[in-house]
Image (tube, helix red, strand yellow):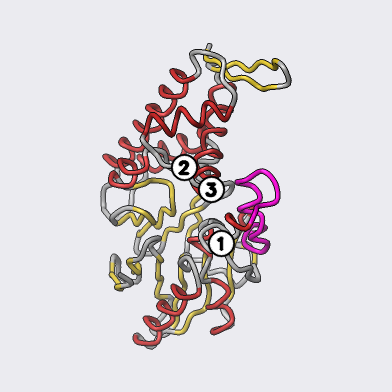
Amino acid sequence: MYELVQVGEKSYYINCPAKIGVYLADEHHVYLIDSGNDKDAGRKVRQILEKNNWKLKGILNTHSNADHIGGNRYLQNQTDCIVFSGGIEAAFTQYPILEPSFLYGGYPCKDLRHKFLLAQDSNVTSFSDVNFPKEIEIVPLPGHFFDMVGFRTPDQTVFLADCISSRETLEKYAISFIYDVEAYLKTLDKVETMKAAMFVPAHAEASADVRDLIQYNRKKIYEVAICLREICSEAMTFEQVLQGVFNHYGLVMNFEQYVLVGSTVRSYLSWLKDKGEMNVDFQNNQLLWKSV
């Protein structure tokens, strides 16, 4: 864990739970793509950079989930580097209490205010700033989160953030976190036709060809949709729907899984309703979901 792996002439990644990209801008200066899940990850990254005599110029954040921005504060304090982010992700990165609040739908209790959902805040600079490395292409990848992006380096390495999950992850957890299902499917279509020398997903193996994995991720989306339509063959409250999902996939509920899977199930229900495949009804002051 935390080994440095070269994947292009100037592109590397640090192998850790959410892969951290490294772009060598010149002989002595690098940019990170994301920063890991906490200050300990940031410390390990700093040690790798120091071992290679590299100075950190900036962190390019793909999106604002805590496991991707958790090392920002530590590295910013240690190196005075710039943290780049954009859109809604910039707001979540600067004010990370927004993530658990969004997931829970209100003020999060202590069970949800931990490093896996609540990173430390960091000072954020826009992608449009003059100091952003112009040789790096920003690749919009919405769906998993609000304004998630990937990055293409000059040696044609594309860092894909969380737009695809590994087979092992999907087989273990069944449902990957998604904010906007329709946008996510469009992102899969986009990446499937994308050309690159190497693709580096944050939660899957780096590969020159990710088409099979994209197809597997797409297949899982439609399997979840079928599951939800079957669960809602009779009118159900959201809590009943969520219980049905957990039972169907053999998941064990805790506070973290409740908000992560729960938020994703709500997104699926919205998508199915907008497609005309799910109806809602209000009875006895309850919102009920039912398949069409």
Q: Earlier in the sequence, mark 3 or mark 1?
A: 1
Q: Earlier in the sequence, mark 2 or mark 1?
A: 1
The residue under label 2 is 253
Image x and y of residue 15, in percent: 32, 66
The residue under label 1 is 114
Helix, strand or loop for disc 2: loop
Amino acid at the residue labelled 2: Met
Image x and y of residue 277, in percent: 53, 16
- Residue density around tag 3, few if under 14, some if 14–19, many if 20 or more, within 10 Å: few
Q: Is residue 278 above or below residue 205?
A: above
Q: Is residue 233 above or below residue 122?
A: above
Q: Which residue is depicted at the point 57% across and 69% down? A: 132
User: Does the magenta run of residues contain 281?
Assistant: no
The residue under label 3 is 255
Q: Which residue is depicted at the point 49% across and 61% down? A: 68
Q: Quadrant of residue 84?
A: bottom right
- Between the C-alphas of marks 3 and 1, the distance is 11 Å
Q: Which residues are magenta?
A: 90-109
User: Does the magenta run of residues contain 96?
Assistant: yes
Image x and y of residue 188, in percent: 41, 39
